[in-house]
Image (tube, grey):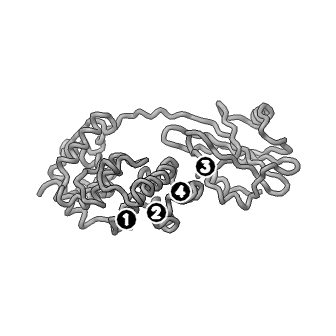
Amino acid sequence: MSFSQKILEWYREHKRELPWRATTDPYKIWLSEIMLQQTRVAQGMPYYHKFLDAFPTVYDLAKAEEEKVLKLWQGLGYYSRARNLHATAKMVVDRYNGNFPNTYKELRSLKGVGDYTASAIASICFDIPEPVVDGNVYRVLSRYFGVDIPINSPKGIGYFKELARDVMDKNDIRDYNQGIMEFGAIQCAPKKPYCLLCPLNESCVALKENKVHSLPVKLNKTKIKHRFFNYLVFWDEKRNTLLEQRKGKGIWQNLYQFPLLETDETIDSKGLVKSIEENNRFPSIKTIHLHNETPVVHKLSHQHLHTKFWVLEVSGSLEEGIPWEKIHDFPVPVLIADFIKTFKF
């Protein structure tokens, strides 16, 4: 029995019943694939259902306000995915009359759709023999064939794509692609693979050479940047506060936040007062209270945010103040959402 046949046999016996596996609708498949990038299935499932309830078709998503899309996405992280999702829905409606393109090349032209997502949609929805290569597939192929080429190097990306093409089942590409990804997620797991009961164990090079936990190889290119955030939670006698929208191309683009002071290092109340006095855009302060003595460290892929929340009472009323009861209507980063849940006046 070939490699691909063993994968298919395993998949038919062990596949999880997931909502996007009961359809070949490109909209639903695309939605699930975008959501599950950088996200576990258990975490992404509720968001998948929420999005389909709010936007049953690509037309509904295309005409939605970006703020609503971002609010529904809140908590999933990597918000560029949500913005690309919204942009692609508009492209599909405007350029393709609401029908997703049915070729790999055209799918790749959609915003936020890379090789993996285009291959997944092409194979699952249109039965096009295009291999998928995601983290799970890299792991299965590198271990089974004993390949130690770094998976995130240009050489590795090209090598594994061709290897995936060589071993795929062209006649049942829909189940095969889903099968090898599922196999990597469940059977050939990152830290605790079930090698003893694996249908591939007799011919797995990594198992034979005791390299299971050293494969796949990945170049460590990420240098972590440390940033120091001071959120200013203003409130007045009417329980109003201030929010601002993040602009530019940085993290959390177009999401809302409390006014932010970013400093070169962590600061105390004296340092905060000095920074506020040097900045003319903030209202005058009556009292200052530090909500969290220990900074909250919010870890992103390339940066760690050391965050303090300062509660600042002001005299009179805040211009453009937002009632605290309405603050939940705004899309905010999960870091701020967690603060809002716990903060009591």
Question: Which residue is under mark 2?
Answer: 48
Label 2 with label 4: CB-CB less than 8 Å: no
- Looking at the rendering, which quadrant does residue 9 occupy? bottom left
Q: Residue at x 57, y 54 (%)?
A: 66
Disc 2, SS: helix
Q: Position of residue 232 (x, y in %)?
A: 73, 44
Whether residue 23 appears in this view of the structure is yes
Question: In what quadrant of the picture does the C terminus appear?
Answer: bottom right
Residue drawn at point x = 25 percent, y = 63 percent? 11
Residue pointed to by mark 1:
20
The answer to whether marks 4 and 1 mark residues whose Cβ atoms lie closer than 8 Å is no
Sequence-earlier tag: 1 or 3:
1
Please, what secondary structure does the residue beneath circle 1 have? helix
What amino acid type should be assigned to the residue bearing mark 3? Leu
| In-image side of 39 versus 102 (left or right) | right
* Residue with the mark numbered 3: 255
Q: Few, some or many C-alpha atoms within 10 Å of disc 4 (few <14, some 14-19, many ≥20)?
A: many
Q: Position of residue 339 (x, y in %)?
A: 66, 53
Residue type (three-letter) at the residue carrying disc 1: Trp
Alpha-carbon distance for marks 2 and 4? 10 Å
Residue at 67% over, 55% down: 340
Mark carried by residue 73: 4
Mark nearer the N terminus (2 vs 4) = 2
